[in-house]
Amino acid sequence: MTSGVRHVSGRITSGVFGRITSVAPVNTVRSRFPRFNAAIWDMQYRLRMWDYLDRGTSTDLIGLLERYTANPRILDLGCGTSINLQLASGGYRYYHGVDISMKAIRAARKHARANSSFEVADVLGYQTAERYDAILLRDVLSCLPEEEITEFLRRIGGFLNPGGKIFIRSWDKSACAEVIRLVLESGFPVLEEQAGRANGGPESSIIVLQGARPS
Ligand SMILES: C[S@@+](CC[C@H](N)C(=O)[O-])C[C@H]1O[C@@H](n2cnc3c(N)ncnc32)[C@H](O)[C@@H]1O
């Protein structure tokens, strides 16, 4: 999946409108002005640029989630509407979704997933006293400033229970090459690295990190 406004190797890409070439340093603007970032994401959801996500599925991630966790408490950072995350009922203990877009979170709440809660927040400054068994980063790392990714991963690793894992999907492996490099060099043991292709899209990447000491 590509972000509606993101800076990837000098390109801005859009899932709905196809590839648009730009040199705007959107990441820099976003990291300095989180409210502006929230407004941009809300605007994209209002323009229905991300509607297509709700028609997709995250079966690739779900298979790995089932393999590496049992009845997990899940934290989904940058969850969007989360409608495409088809968790089996009874297959998880609790789900908490966080997104910067109020509009996306409203749609997520309407969807009424069982045993769930949602929150509007910027994941870059996100803190929680809750602990989880799985953290999902589905096509969200590429929306964050690259220079903040290593520290971001280190911080969210602290939200995990012993044995917890971080599941990272990047929709376009080649456009997200730098993000993937930062993930692989983050210091967390890599449990799994897979390439996939969903819905005729580009080759994607899924990485599972051992986020906290084994239980
Ligand atoms: C490409 S969409 C992916 C949505 C969802 N994870 C999925 O796979 O369907 C990226 C999501 O990240 C959210 N996002 C981007 N920057 C964020 C930030 N700093 N904090 C929280 N959410 C953010 C956007 O609002 C958007 O919903």
Image (cartoon, helix red, strand yellow):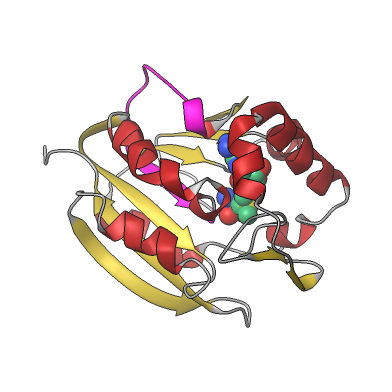
Q: Quadrant of the N terminus?
A: bottom right
Q: Is residue 164 visible?
A: yes
Residue 129 falls in which quadrant of the image?
top left
* Residue 127: in magenta span: yes
Ligand 1 falls in quadrant: top right
Q: Residue at x 19, y 38 (%)?
A: 212
Q: Nearer the viewer, residue 91 or 128?
A: 128
Q: Which residues are magenta?
A: 124-139
Q: Is residue 105 visible?
A: no
Outermost residue, top side: 129
Q: Residue at x 47, y 73 (%)?
A: 173
Q: Position of residue 154 (x, y in %)?
A: 29, 37
Q: Nearer the viewer, residue 107 or 32?
A: 32
Residue 139 falls in which quadrant of the image?
bottom right
Q: Nearer the viewer, residue 123 or 50?
A: 123
* Residue 74: in magenta span: no
The number of callouts visible is 0
Outermost residue, right side: 47
Q: Position of residue 114 (x, y in %)?
A: 56, 35
**Horizontal side, residue 34 vs residue 69: left or right:** right
Q: Quadrant of the C terminus?
A: top left
Q: In this picture, is 8 found above or below 132? A: below
Q: In this picture, is 36 found above or below 48? A: above
Q: Position of residue 15 (x, y in %)?
A: 72, 66
Q: Residue at x 56, y 76 (%)?
A: 198
Q: Position of residue 65 (x, y in %)?
A: 36, 54
